[in-house]
Image (tube, rainbow, N blue to C red):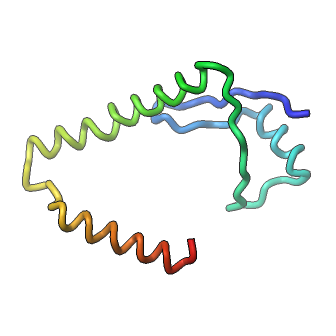
């Protein structure tokens, strides 16, 4: 049986697993995770709490990442990246992603 535990989000919106959660994850895995090991977890929706957490993370990202970038470009428009450059970089990343078989 799986026991619930709460993720703790820091000021940047990054989730951290408490010690009790780490112990539960180790028990589920049956071993200590290896560096770089990927572990899939399923989030269980307990009503509006998951929605509230997602809203908080998105709100934090908008305030700490997006807004400062917008303010920086407004203050100095020469820092803007032309759309053509962005699309070319995205096309290249997509090609690499496809070539890697993803």
Q: Residue furthest bottom?
A: 99
Relative vertical location of residue 71 with respect to residue 85 in this rendering, above or below: above
Q: Is residue 79 left or right of residue 11?
A: left
Which of 38/36 is in front? Answer: 38
User: Could you tell me which residue is drawn at 53 percent across and 22 percent down?
Assistant: 52
Which of 8/55 is in front? Answer: 55
- Looking at the rendering, which quadrant does residue 45 occupy? top right
Relative vertical location of residue 79 with respect to residue 16 in this rendering, above or below: below
Relative vertical location of residue 79 with respect to residue 19 in this rendering, above or below: below
User: Could you tell me which residue is drawn at 45 percent across and 76 percent down?
Assistant: 96
User: Could you tell me which residue is drawn at 24 percent across and 38 percent down?
Assistant: 68
Q: Is residue 10 left or right of residue 45?
A: left
The location of residue 77, given as percent across then percent down, is 8, 50
- Looking at the rendering, which quadrant does residue 79 occupy? bottom left
The location of residue 37, given as percent across then percent down, is 72, 60
Q: Residue furthest top?
A: 48
The location of residue 54, given as percent across then percent down, is 51, 30
Check the picture and name the quadrant holding the N terminus: top right
Check the picture and name the quadrant holding the C terminus: bottom right
The number of discs equals 0
User: Could you tell me which residue is drawn at 10 percent across and 41 percent down?
Assistant: 74
Which of 61/48 is in front? Answer: 48
């Amino acid at each position: 049986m799986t026991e619930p535990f709460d993720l703790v989000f820091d000021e940047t919106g990054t989730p951290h697993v408490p010690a009790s959660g780490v112990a539960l994850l180790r028990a589920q895995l049956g071993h200590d995770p290896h560096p770089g090991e990927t572990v899939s977890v399923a989030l269980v929706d307990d009503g509006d709490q998951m929605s509230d957490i997602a809203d908080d993370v998105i709100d934090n990202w908008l305030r700490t990442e997006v807004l400062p970038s917008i303010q920086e470009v407004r203050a100095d428009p020469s820092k803007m990246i032309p759309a053509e450059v962005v699309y070319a970089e995205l096309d290249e990343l997509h090609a690499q992603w496809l070539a890697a078989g993803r």
